[in-house]
Image (cartoon, grey):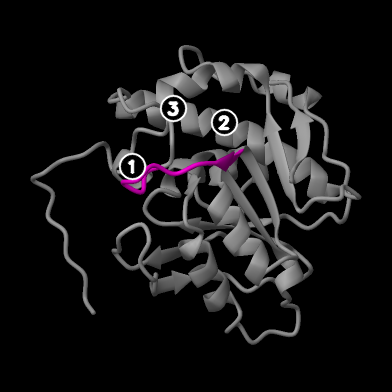
């Protein structure tokens, strides 16, 4: 179960985000009983049908994700500021996480950020991290894994396994938060079974999955969207 929360802010992709509206977004009660926090407003729910299988405008999708991420990170920032002044360090999960990079830097300000590059895989296969570039925190600054679509949870689990290898006196798993736009029921379960202490900040949770592995109602691939849309002529390769 998740702690439900109503945010106030503009998520309409037809107009520029009015940052002043974000000042009215409150923090989440840190004493909530659930490690999953659902942060959305009614306008976000109105946008959801536009994310469906008939959705083909990747530019609008990128703009919408950027605005939703801005509202999400304002909530996250205000919540974490109640616990300490340290700036959260975003860890972008490539490729789809690039959709969240601009908003995360707008809200959190300039400062170090990192990335995780998972292996190319089917949605239900075991994920391996091909490359990681993560700044070591010099204080109690929390890490925020940013991935717009959490489906099976395997990428987050692989990222956590990578973070566990960090040897640093200031490091602890309690520092890790997850920020995502879409969170499936199975993904949330898999993450909290292995890492029950991780707080998740999301827009939509408890989402189901279609037989083909796609999240129900979400008709686009975040990685392709981040790269400007599907292109059959794109050259792809990886070094094993």
Image quarter of the C terminus: bottom left
- Circle 2 residues within 10 Å: few <14, some 14–19, many ≥20: many
The residues tagged by marks 1 and 2 sit, at their Cα atoms, a distance apart of: 17 Å
| Badge number at residue 63 | 3
Q: Which mark is residue 68?
A: 2
Q: Is the magenta region chiefly helix, strand or loop?
A: loop
Q: Residue furthest top?
A: 14
Earlier in the chain: of badge 3 and badge 2, it is: 3
Q: Residue 194 in the image: x percent, y percent?
A: 64, 71
Mark before the other along the chain sequence, 3 or 1? 3
The residue mark sitting in front, 1 or 2, is 1
Which residues make up the magenta segment? 205-214
Q: Tell me, yes or no, whether the highlighted magenta stretch contains residue 207.
A: yes
Label 1 close to label 2 by CB (< 8 Å)? no
Q: Position of residue 106 (x, y in %)?
A: 59, 38
Q: In front of the other: label 3 or label 1?
A: 1
């Amino acid at each position: 179960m998740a702690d439900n929360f109503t945010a106030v802010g503009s998520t309409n992709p037809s107009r520029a985000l009015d940052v002043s509206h974000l000042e009215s977004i409150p923090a989440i009660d840190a004493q909530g009983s659930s490690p999953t926090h659902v942060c959305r407003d009614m306008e976000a729910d109105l946008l959801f049908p536009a994310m469906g299988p008939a959705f083909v405008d990747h530019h609008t999708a990128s703009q919408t994700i950027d605005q939703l991420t801005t509202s999400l990170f304002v909530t996250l920032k205000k919540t974490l500021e109640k616990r300490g002044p340290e700036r959260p360090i975003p860890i972008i999960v490539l490729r789809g996480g690039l959709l969240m990079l601009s908003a995360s830097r707008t809200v959190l300000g300039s400062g170090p950020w990192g990335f995780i590059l998972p292996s190319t895989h089917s949605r239900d296969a075991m994920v391996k991290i091909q490359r990681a570039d993560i700044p070591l925190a010099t204080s109690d600054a929390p890490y925020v894994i940013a991935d717009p679509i959490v489906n099976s949870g395997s990428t987050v689990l692989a990222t956590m396994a990578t973070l566990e290898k960090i040897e640093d006196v200031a490091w602890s798993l309690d520092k890790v938060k997850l920020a995502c736009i879409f969170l499936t029921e199975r993904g949330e379960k898999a993450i909290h079974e292995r890492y029950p202490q991780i707080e998740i900040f999301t827009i939509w949770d408890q989402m189901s999955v279609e037989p083909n592995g796609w999240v129900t109602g979400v008709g686009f691939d975040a990685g392709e969207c981040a790269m400007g849309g599907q292109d059959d002529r794109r050259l792809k390769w990886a070094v094993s």
